[in-house]
Image (cartoon, rainbow, N blue to C red):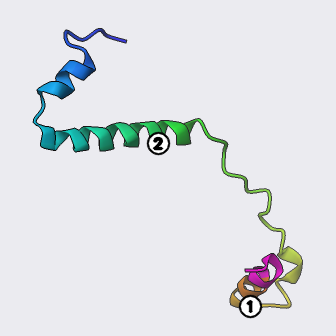
């Protein structure tokens, strides 16, 4: 990573205090975004699991039934 002439802490100290919150928000955003990238891939192994019921229920009925089965 390229070395900057001033440390990050020094640069932040030069900002007016009312901008420190924005810096904190941005850093938290970057950390959260990085954590999501390093997370697991979204599982979709459930896709098609209710295939056997498509002739018995409409999509709306099936959605309600799935909620019942899950206990929601």
Within 10 Å of the Cα at label 2, are there few (<14), some (14-19), or many (20+) other Cα atoms?
Answer: few
What is the x, y in percent for residue 15? Answer: 12, 31
Among all residues in the image, which is located at the extreme right? 52
Labelled disc at residue 32:
2
Residue 69: quarter of image: bottom right
Magenta stretch containing residue 45, yes or no? no
Please report the residue visible at 79 percent of the width from the left and 62 percent of the height from the top: 46
Q: Is residue 68 left or right of residue 24?
A: right
Q: Main secondary structure of the magenta part?
A: helix
What is the x, y in percent for residue 23? Answer: 25, 38
Residue 44 against residue 10 in the figure, above or below: below
Magenta stretch containing residue 67, yes or no? yes
Residue 55: quarter of image: bottom right
Residue 20 against residue 68 in the figure, above or below: above
Check the picture and name the quadrant holding the C terminus: bottom right
- Stretch of the chain drawn in magenta: 66-72
Question: In the depicted view, which residue is nearer to us: 48 or 28?
Answer: 28
Please report the residue visible at 19 percent of the width from the left and 9 percent of the height from the top: 5
Residue 31 against residue 54 in the figure, above or below: above
Q: Is residue 69 left or right of residue 21?
A: right
Labelled disc at residue 61:
1
What is the x, y in percent for residue 12? Answer: 20, 27
Please report the residue visible at 23 percent of the width from the left and 43 percent of the height from the top: 22
Q: What element carries label 2?
A: helix
Check the picture and name the quadrant holding the N terminus: top left
Q: Which of marks 1 and 2 is nearer the N terminus?
A: 2
Q: How many discs mark residues in the rendered view?
A: 2
Q: Is mark 1 on a helix, strand or loop?
A: helix
Residue 38: quarter of image: top right
Q: Which of marks 1 and 2 is in front?
A: 2
User: CB atoms at circles 1 and 2 under 8 Å apart?
Assistant: no
């Amino acid at each position: 990573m390229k070395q900057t002439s001033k440390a990050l802490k020094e640069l932040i100290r030069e900002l007016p205090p009312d901008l420190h919150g924005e810096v904190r928000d941005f850093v938290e955003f970057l950390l959260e975004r990085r954590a999501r990238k390093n997370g697991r891939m979204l599982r979709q192994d459930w896709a098609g699991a209710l295939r056997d019921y498509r002739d018995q229920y409409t999509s709306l009925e099936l959605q309600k039934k799935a909620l019942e089965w899950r206990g929601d």
